[in-house]
Image (cartoon, grey):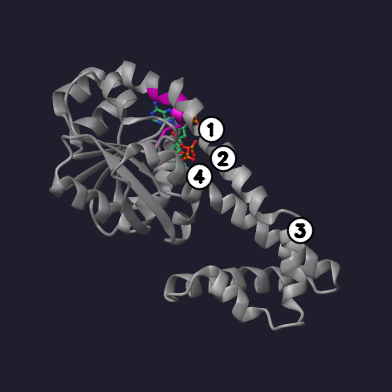
Amino acid sequence: MRYGFIGAGNMCSAIIKGMAAAEIYVYDIYREKCEALGSKVNVCADNNEVIANADMLILGVKPNMLQGFFDAHKAALQEHKPLLVSLAAGKTIDFLEECIGVDMPVARVMPNINSVCMSSTTGYCCNKLVNAEHKNQIEELFGNIGTVMEIADESKFPVFTALAGSSPAFCYMYIDALARAGQKAGMSRDQALQIAAETVLGSAKMILASEEHPFALIDRVCSPGGTTIEGVSVLQKESFESIINSAIEAVIEKDKTLAQK
Ligand SMILES: NC(=O)c1ccc[n+]([C@@H]2O[C@H](COP(=O)([O-])OP(=O)(O)OC[C@H]3O[C@@H](n4cnc5c(N)ncnc54)[C@H](OP(=O)(O)O)[C@@H]3O)[C@@H](O)[C@H]2O)c1
């Protein structure tokens, strides 16, 4: 299996770093980004060289660069027909197929920034030409940087983008807010941040390991008349759930807007 990467930015370099030995071809406008990936990659002179060598082609450029990429490389794609994997937020399978203008296997994949520490929650959806073997190949590649799940119905992809692609930013905000509150209450910033991050990590593991509903777990932390119920009541009074809901809705709306451009 030969992998081609268009772009060697944040996401592609995280994926490549997670890969075991493989035949990897990469091109980025900034050659130094490719060279920083070391001897495990073949640094190409241009995108045509990547396309010519790739069984799976991963498009790791920003969504607004995609159209220009397709305009310049349509002929090479039509000739080589790799399994095309787009990482671009908001760009639908229909858009990608229209840009290529020829039948070929196309997948839309959304990893998240936690791929840097091999903890991405990655989702993908495919066109009809992606077969079971292609899906295994996608799951194997992105399994190197975390967990992978198929979102078979593409209409749910904007929801996946919000819940997995964007929500790391919300989780970082929550952890930071906890740490700042600890700092305000007199703890050192570093210690408060470590406690907040480890507690969120442990709580996530608890949700995944437990068969109980999150509310049952909340009840288990809240002793009657105790300390935790005081904080939970404030979060409810200040519309914690409603704010999260609005943030997720805003991401979904933006994703739909990007799809229309
Ligand atoms: N970062 C994330 O957390 C994340 C999460 C999920 C999905 N994604 C998706 O992953 C894709 C890449 O994001 P990123 O954060 O890795 O972007 P990035 O760090 O900007 O990397 C993209 C790299 O590709 C270069 N480039 C642009 N056009 C090119 C071309 N025609 N040929 C070769 N290289 C080219 C860029 O140069 P310039 O800087 O000059 O453009 C840049 O060095 C995006 O579509 C994004 O939506 C990112």
Query: Is residue 154 found left or right of 74 in the rendered image?
Result: right
Q: From the image, tell me which residue sits under label 2.
A: 249
Ligand 1 resides in the quarter of the picture at top left
Q: Nearer the viewer, mark 2 or mark 4?
A: 2
Q: Position of residue 3 (x, y in %)?
A: 24, 44
* Residue 61 is a magenta residue: yes
Give the residue type at disc 4: Ala
Q: Residue at x 60, y 57 (%)?
A: 171
Residue 237: numbered disc: 3
Distance from disc 3 to disc 2, alpha carbons, whole Å, reads 21 Å
Q: Earlier in the sequence, mark 3 or mark 1?
A: 3
Q: Say if mark 1 contacts mark 2, CB within 8 Å.
A: yes
| Residue 33 higher or lower than 242, as above or below | above
Q: Earlier in the sequence, mark 2 or mark 4?
A: 4
Residue 162: numbered disc: 4
Distance from disc 4 to disc 1, alpha carbons, whole Å, reads 10 Å
Residue range in magenta is 60-66
Q: From the image, tell me which residue sits under label 1.
A: 253
Give the residue type at disc 1: Glu
Q: Earlier in the sequence, mark 3 or mark 2?
A: 3
| Residue 13 higher or lower than 185, as above or below | above
